[in-house]
Image (tube, helix red, strand yellow):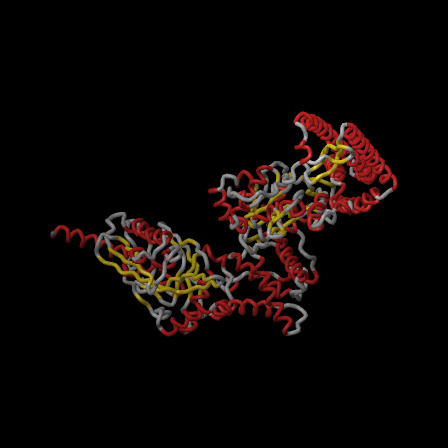
């Protein structure tokens, strides 16, 4: 039952094939006339979540900003945070100083913003003054007199002791003199020393007397020497006390000034007291005479004890800091302890402690890309540990990993008060939620960036402001109204809907940058529609080599695609190929064969293990459709095979399920299908055609094949009616539709599609349960009934 031309569904008019903007509603002639963008375009849900995350002060309410790359996540959050940060006070400075009680554990000191570098300079001035004043004090007459008095008094005591010993020795017949082995007590006779030889010749009794007296005298001499040494020690202590007194007196007023300046900070006061005591204790290090050979090499490390290491300086910070860490390695996030080599040995001290992003962002905001930090496992674990503990502790990476290492510094942790914003994809978020139990406790706020926004006047105006901002920021030529219109149309195509605009601003920005190049080549005052159009064409031309090769193979007949004539059980399906940046449509021949049997529909792609799960599901739905439509009064007995011809890679997706069904219905009914019309759309068990993706690329891909094979006015594409709003076709296809040489047919059901493909009525079921005679459904039902009867007869014969 063939349909009359007037009964066949008409294709879409040209105005339905692309976003049509009313330029009159855009109240500017170019982007030069509008204000730069303020705020985030169309991301109200994400903006509300971000505001909530920033306002709540409780621990763990850090933010995960979810969205696809290119949506302007980083730029948007940076600008948003900078606006918020202006209203907050600058955070504290942080310094590390030497710990005089435990040199391996430097102390952290907190100071108001700007006072850290000031404290460092004050300490430098203090030490310069001390290095000048202490030597002067020790060169003074007062010190010299007091020191001389101490020494003279000691020498007088020592002289008296020696004189008394010598006098006593002479009275007892001995003299005291120095020898190579120390002090010697030698007996004398007639004023002359008694030699050992003479002593041995004396009578035993006399010799014994002399030796006993000598022994007693030796003990007295030893006691005298002990007293002399005690006097020396006492003298040394008195001189040291004097030096300490002089040093303390000399430097006290210098420290008094600093104590008055930093009197409210107990940590600074304690540190200054420790510095003063250490200088008094080591006064000789500041004296020329205290320097021994090689002291020049030791002076620098010694003097470093008194240096202040300002690791966070907010003297120039206006508001809270906003830090974006683009390379979140362990040391870049947590900080590090540097080392220097001296004589082949590594040394370190508190002045070699370097801050990480957590230190720099403390009191403000830290932005990190989730995928980047996850590629650095130590950094991720250290970040979580810091957020859990509420402080940042600089450790060697090997220690964090539990490996043994050499003894090194363990700086005291610095308390944290900041918000961390992780930027990542939705997939990364789901993986972290599933596999990292710490993540949901530390990042309780999720802000989602959409890839599309509604096409309305407000968002159009913001979009134009975004373009203005880009042009001013990168010194590009501004866009006139025709170019703006073209950019918005391209944005709508990226969004995949005529009522939406894309928020993949990276793509939009690239097109504008390239259009600027072509405008400059022509010395144009503005970027025009022609420049934008060329940018889009050139961008696609640079990457479409694979598509050109496939079209060439189709043209040469290597890949078999017919766009003329009719064939039973054969239809042109449409696939989308995505290779990196390149996405294009490619027609594929789908064939179906049928015969007697009970196997049902066999998916050859599945049997060859080339079918993905979604494609397999789509083919299985065809069984459901046939059962629903034709098997209410008979068993479904057939053996059908469906295949994508010349398909050598995997097949996935269900967008070809309607095309497969059309091929199957044609094979069962014996009615040929027009090869001039390609098909896309998925089907459900009720025969309803469902929307699919990549609709524009599929239509344009088939049009290119028809163009190289020869347009005859009958070619076109059947699409789901649900995809009509998704159409944003290129100018060439729209022009072909206007001329009537190419057609786009939207359909809701399988029956609508089969009528367009065959020119034969699909056929409704009549009250008696049968279909109208001569229709597609009638012929299919008849064929299935014949199969059922033949199978029953075959079984009875056996």
- Give how far across and how far down residue 341 sits, in percent: 62, 52
Rendered-image quadrant of the N terminus: bottom left
Write the residue at 68% across / 30% down. Answer: 202
Please state which of residues 506 and 131 is positioned toward the viewer in this rendering: 131
Please state which of residues 226 and 309 is positioned toward the viewer in this rendering: 226
Task: Give the total number of marks visible in the rendering.
Answer: 0
- Give how far across and how far down residue 787 sits, in percent: 21, 55
Decide if residue 726 is on the left or right side of residue 364. Answer: left
Rendered image quadrant of residue 664: bottom left
Residue lying at the far right in this picture: please name it: 141
Please state which of residues 697 and 519 is positioned toward the viewer in this rendering: 519
Write the residue at 57% across / 41% down. Answer: 445
Q: Is residue 86 visible?
A: no
> Image height check: is 174 above or below 617?
above
Decide if residue 606 is on the left or right side of residue 255. Answer: left
Decide if residue 505 is on the left or right side of residue 640. Answer: right
Write the residue at 77% across / 45% down. Answer: 286
Residue lying at the far left in this picture: please name it: 797
- Give how far across and how far down residue 766 sits, in percent: 31, 51
> Image height check: is 358 above or below 494?
above
> Image height check: is 220 above or below 415?
above
Q: Is residue 450 visible?
A: yes
- Give how far across and how far down residue 231 sits, in percent: 77, 32
Please state which of residues 627 and 196 is positioned toward the viewer in this rendering: 196
Rendered image quadrant of residue 242: top right
């Amino acid at each position: 039952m063939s349909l009359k031309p007037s009964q066949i569904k008409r294709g879409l008019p040209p105005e339905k094939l692309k976003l049509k903007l009313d330029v009159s509603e855009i109240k500017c002639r170019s982007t030069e006339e509008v204000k730069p963008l303020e705020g985030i375009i169309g991301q109200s849900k994400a903006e509300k979540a971000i505001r909530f995350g920033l306002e709540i002060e409780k621990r763990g309410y850090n933010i995960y900003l979810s969205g696809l790359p290119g949506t302007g996540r980083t730029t948007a959050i940076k600008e948003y945070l900078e606006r918020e940060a202006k209203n907050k006070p600058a955070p504290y400075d942080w310094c590390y100083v030497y710990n005089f009680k435990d040199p391996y554990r430097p102390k952290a000191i907190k100071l108001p913003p700007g006072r850290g570098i000031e404290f460092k300079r004050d300490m430098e001035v203090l030490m310069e003054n001390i290095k000048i004043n202490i030597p002067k004090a020790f060169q003074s007459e007062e010190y010299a007199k007091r020191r001389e008095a101490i020494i003279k008094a000691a020498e007088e005591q020592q002289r008296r002791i020696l004189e008394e010993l010598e006098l006593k020795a002479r009275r007892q017949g001995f003299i005291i003199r120095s020898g190579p082995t120390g002090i010697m007590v030698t007996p004398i006779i007639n004023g002359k020393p008694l030699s050992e030889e003479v002593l041995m010749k004396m009578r035993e009794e006399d010799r014994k007397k002399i030796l006993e007296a000598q022994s007693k005298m030796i003990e007295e001499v030893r006691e005298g020497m002990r007293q002399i040494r005690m006097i020396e020690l006492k003298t040394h202590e008195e001189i040291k006390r004097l030096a300490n007194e002089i040093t303390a007196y000399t430097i006290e007023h210098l420290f008094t000034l600093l104590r008055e300046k930093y009197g409210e900070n107990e940590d600074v006061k304690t540190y200054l007291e420790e510095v003063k005591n250490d200088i008094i204790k080591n006064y000789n290090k500041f004296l020329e005479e205290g320097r021994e050979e090689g002291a020049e090499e030791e002076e620098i490390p010694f003097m470093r004890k008194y240096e202040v290491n300002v690791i966070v300086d907010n003297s120039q910070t206006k508001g809270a800091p906003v830090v974006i860490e683009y390379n979140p390695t362990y040391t870049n996030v947590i900080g590090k302890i540097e080392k220097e080599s001296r004589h082949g040995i590594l040394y370190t001290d508190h002045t070699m402690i370097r801050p990480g992003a957590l230190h720099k962002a403390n009191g403000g905001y830290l932005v990190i890309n989730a995928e980047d930090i996850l590629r650095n496992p130590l950094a991720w674990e250290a970040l979580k540990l810091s957020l859990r503990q509420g402080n940042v502790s600089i450790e060697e990476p090997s220690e964090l990993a539990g490996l043994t290492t050499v003894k090194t510094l363990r700086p005291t942790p610095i308390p944290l008060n900041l918000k961390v914003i992780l930027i990542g994809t939705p997939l990364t978020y789901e993986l972290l939620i599933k596999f990292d139990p710490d993540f949901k406790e530390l990042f309780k706020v999720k802000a989602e960036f959409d890839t599309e926004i509604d096409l309305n006047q407000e968002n159009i105006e913001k979009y134009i402001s975004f373009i203005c901002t880009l042009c001013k920021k990168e010194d590009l030529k501004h866009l006139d109204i025709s170019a703006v219109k073209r950019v918005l149309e391209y944005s709508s195509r990226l969004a995949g809907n005529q009522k939406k605009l894309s928020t993949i601003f990276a793509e939009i920005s690239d097109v504008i940058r390239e259009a600027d190049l072509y405008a400059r080549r022509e010395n144009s005052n503005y970027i025009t529609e022609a420049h934008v159009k060329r940018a889009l064409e050139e961008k696609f031309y640079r990457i479409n080599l694979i598509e050109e090769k496939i079209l060439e193979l189709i043209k040469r007949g290597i890949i078999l695609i017919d766009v003329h004539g009719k064939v039973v059980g054969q239809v042109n399906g449409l696939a989308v190929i995505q290779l990196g940046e390149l996405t294009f449509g490619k027609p594929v021949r789908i064939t179906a064969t049928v015969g007697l049997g009970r196997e049902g529909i066999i998916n050859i792609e599945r049997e060859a293990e080339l079918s993905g799960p979604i494609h397999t599901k789509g083919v299985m739905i065809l069984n459901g459709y046939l059962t629903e439509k034709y098997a209410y009064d008979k068993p479904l007995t057939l053996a059908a095979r469906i295949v994508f011809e010349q398909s050598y890679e995997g097949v996935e997706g269900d967008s070809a399920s309607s095309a497969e069904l059309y091929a199957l219905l044609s094979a069962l009914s014996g009615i040929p299908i027009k090869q001039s019309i390609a098909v896309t759309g998925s089907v459900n068990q009720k025969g309803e055609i469902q929307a699919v993706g990549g609709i524009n690329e599929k239509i344009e891909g088939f049009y290119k094949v028809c163009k190289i094979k020869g347009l005859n006015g009958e070619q076109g594409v059947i699409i789901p009616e649900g995809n009509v709003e998704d159409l944003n076709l290129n100018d060439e296809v729209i022009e072909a539709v206007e001329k009537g040489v190419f057609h786009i047919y939207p359909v809701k059901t399988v029956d609508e599609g089969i009528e367009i493909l065959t020119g034969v009525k699909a056929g409704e079921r009549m009250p008696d349960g049968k279909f109208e005679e001569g229709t597609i459904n009638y012929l299919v039902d008849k064929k299935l009934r014949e199969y059922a009867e033949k199978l029953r007869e075959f079984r009875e014969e056996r």
